[in-house]
Structures are given as structure tokens and as C-alpha cells.
């Protein structure tokens, strides 16, 4: 039986890039055993054969593996501000902006960015860097397959234009996928690169200590061009933007001075 599970881990990794060995074995094994038994299979080997031939089952399996709390167009009003107020200003200075989605999780945020920015920059010219510390969420992001609930906030015309239905799941179109480069990165330890015109880091900083936040704001500021924008989440207002060389451009948008 242990060999059965080890082979399953290897095959899943080869097929999807998701490494089940990074999860606690007892917990993950128990979870997957109950899933395959519920589906009527007798072993991990049988389960993988089915996954390999059934898109819908594979999508359900991936959904189970990477608990997905993110969604497209999260807090829609903020994306509207980015679209109508922030981007026209950035584009007037640089028609080919350099953009980074930091701590991008399973990819909804950088793909949303690409969809919003497609109104301002041709997709063929758009380049978005998306980073996260977790290899498994990055593997899931690269696959670009999402459950219907992730699309709740997406405008209907955007769903039609940039998503392809796969059973009860949706796949991001290749045109959008090509605009995003995913890379592993530890925000606290790694160099940021840049300079960027726009950095998006939303609903992540709430998990850091005040000292770590302070360090990250300094690093984000250093990684932005003068006039560049930092876009944060709706619970992450910076109350002393001056300290980091920022001024408030709009609520939750900070411009580097």
C-alpha cells in the first residue's frame, strides 16, 4: 500500500506539477483515500488511471488539493478604480508597464490583472510577473482551471471572452495565460527586482507582524518607479504612507513620490 501511494504522488507530480509529498502524509493520504473510495475506486493506482482519463474528475481532485480561498475580481469596486483611474495615469507615462502580482496564490489575481489591463495594453505586449512561496499553488495557477464559485464577481462579458467551460469548471484562455509568468519567491527573504510601475499585494499583509509589514512596505517602495503604484487589500490601509515614500493616490492605492 505505501508503494501504491508513492507511485500516485510521482504520477500526479509528472502530470500536474503538484507535489503531494509537500503535504503531511497521514492527513493527505486519509483525505485522498476517502475521496477515491467515495468515487468507487479500490486503490490509488485505479484512482490515477481514472484521473488521467477524466478531466472533470481531475479538476475536482485539484480543487480538493489546493484549498482555494481566492476569487477573480475580488472587491470589484477596487478593480474598477484600477481600470478607470489608476491605469490611464500609468499608461500615459509608460505604454508598456512593468507589473508584479506578489503572493499571487492560485492565480486569480494576476489573471484578473491581465483581464482588466487588456483594455489598456494589447495582450501580446502585456507581461505580468506573479510570485508565491508555495510551489503547489503556483502549479495550480499555471494550470488555470477554476471552479464556478471563483468566477462569482467576474463580469459576464469577461467570462465569455476569457474563460472556456470544462464541465462544471472553467479554464482561463491561453491568450490570458501567456501574459503571466509564475515564479517561486519568499517576500521576506528574496530580492524584489524591478523597478515596477504597478505592484499588487492584496489580502496577504494581514498575516504578517507589524515589523514584517514595515520591512515589506520599505521593499515595495524601493521596487517601484517614482510615480509607480502599490495596490493593497481592503483591510490593509497604510496609515502612515509618508514613512515609506508613498502618497495616497486612491483608497488602497499608494503612489511612490
Image (cartoon, grey):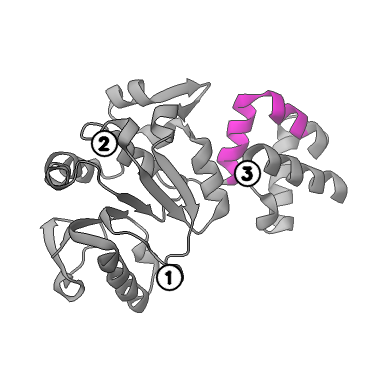
Which residue shows up at 39% across the image and 49% down it? Answer: 129
> SS for tag 3?
loop
Q: Is residue 107 visible?
A: no
Q: Give the overall secondary structure of the magenta segment.
A: helix
Which residue is disc 2 drawn over? 116
Which residue shows up at 73% across the image and 56% down it? Answer: 25
Up/down of 127 relative to 54, above or below: below
Which residue shows up at 71% across the image and 28% down it? Answer: 52
Q: In the rendered structure, are the residues bearing label 2 and label 1 in contact, judged by CB atoms less than 8 Å apart? A: no
- Percent x, y for residue 14? 70, 40
Q: Which residues are magenta?
A: 47-65
Which residue is disc 3 drawn over? 17
Between residues 146 and 117, which one lies in front from this camera angle?
117
Q: Is residue 30 visible?
A: yes
Up/down of 137 relative to 175, above or below: below
Mark closest to the chain's N terminus, 3 or 1: 3
Which residue shows up at 21% across the image and 72% down it? Answer: 244
Amino acid at each position: 500500500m505505501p508503494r501504491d501511494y508513492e507511485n500516485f504522488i510521482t504520477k500526479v507530480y509528472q502530470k500536474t506539477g503538484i507535489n503531494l509529498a509537500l503535504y503531511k502524509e497521514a492527513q493527505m493520504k486519509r483525505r485522498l483515500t476517502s475521496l477515491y473510495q467515495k468515487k468507487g475506486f479500490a486503490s490509488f493506482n485505479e484512482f490515477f488511471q481514472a484521473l488521467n482519463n477524466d478531466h472533470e474528475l481531475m479538476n475536482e481532485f485539484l480543487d480538493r488539493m489546493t484549498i482555494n480561498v481566492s476569487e477573480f475580481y475580488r472587491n470589484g469596486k477596487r478593480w474598477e478604480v484600477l481600470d478607470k483611474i489608476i491605469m490611464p495615469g500609468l499608461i500615459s507615462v509608460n505604454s508598456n508597464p512593468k507589473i508584479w502580482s506578489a503572493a499571487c496564490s492560485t492565480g486569480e489575481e494576476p489573471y484578473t490583472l491581465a483581464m482588466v489591463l487588456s483594455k489598456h495594453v494589447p495582450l501580446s505586449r502585456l507581461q505580468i510577473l506573479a510570485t508565491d512561496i508555495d510551489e503547489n499553488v503556483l502549479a495550480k495557477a499555471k494550470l488555470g482551471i477554476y471552479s464556478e464559485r471563483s468566477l462569482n464577481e467576474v463580469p459576464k462579458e469577461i467570462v465569455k471572452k476569457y474563460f472556456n467551460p470544462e464541465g462544471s469548471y472553467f479554464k482561463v484562455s491561453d491568450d490570458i495565460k501567456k501574459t503571466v509568468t509564475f515564479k517561486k519567491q519568499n517576500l521576506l527573504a528574496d530580492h524584489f527586482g524591478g523597478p515596477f510601475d504597478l505592484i499588487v499585494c492584496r489580502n496577504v499583509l494581514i498575516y504578517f507582524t507589524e515589523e514584517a509589514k514595515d520591512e515589506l512596505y520599505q521593499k515595495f517602495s524601493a521596487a517601484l518607479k517614482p510615480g509607480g503604484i502599490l495596490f493593497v487589500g481592503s483591510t490593509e490601509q497604510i496609515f502612515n504612507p509618508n514613512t515609506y515614500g508613498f502618497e495616497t493616490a486612491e483608497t488602497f492605492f499608494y503612489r511612490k513620490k
